[in-house]
Image (cartoon, rainbow, N blue to C red):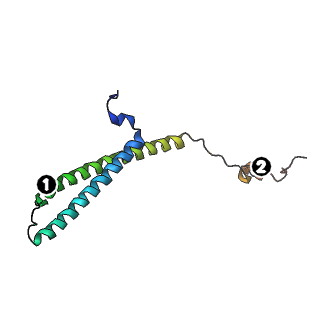
Amino acid sequence: MSDPKNPLDRLDRQELHWLTGILKDACRERLEKNLVSQAFEERLYQRGPVEGRLDPRPFLKIWEPRYRKFLEVAGELYARMEGEDARAAAASLRGQFAAAPSITRHGPASSHVMIEKNAANPRRKSRTR
């Protein structure tokens, strides 16, 4: 039974899949932004400290492993949701095609004239008179 206070219960499966995709993309963007900021700060501080400004490099370096971890977890969540969707789709297709009736050919090969025993009897006409 689901918890009525859980906000994720308001989302269906497809919306949860989209949410994990958004989370994964946001984590990747945040990590990239952090790496760019670190590179910028390193180049800025090669010239020396900036007066009246605290050095943000230690703070940026503290957050980098966290962003990597968040991205890894978000990627795994997304892959799991995608895998479950693929399994559900495969199961539904399997069920759909397993229950399909056998196909019989309609055409000249199934005609009573073309059946072997009738084709061997040359006196049999294709039309009745």
Can residue 62 be seen in the rendering of this structure?
yes
For this rendering, which residue is in front, 72 or 6? 6
Indicate left or right for 62 with 73 as reference. Answer: left
Which callout, 2 or 1, points to the residue nearer the camera?
A: 1
Q: Residues within 10 Å of mark 1 (few under 14, many from 20)?
A: few
Residue at (30% x, 53% y) in the render: 26
Q: Residues within 10 Å of mark 2 (few under 14, many from 20)?
A: some
Where residue 55 sits: x, y (%)?
10, 61
Can residue 79 be seen in the rendering of this structure?
no
Indicate left or right for 75 with 105 as reference. Answer: left
For this rendering, which residue is in front, 73 or 54? 54
List the single residue furthest toward the bottom. 47
Which residue, given by chain and number where applicable, does mark 2 sit on? 118
Where residue 35 sits: x, y (%)?
21, 62
Indicate left or right for 84 with 113 as reference. Answer: left
Which residue, given by chain and number where applicable, does mark 1 sit on? 62
- Vertical placement of residue 10 versus 54, above or below: above
Indicate left or right for 71 with 46 as reference. Answer: right
What secondary structure is marked by label 2? Answer: helix
Where residue 101 sits: x, y (%)?
60, 41
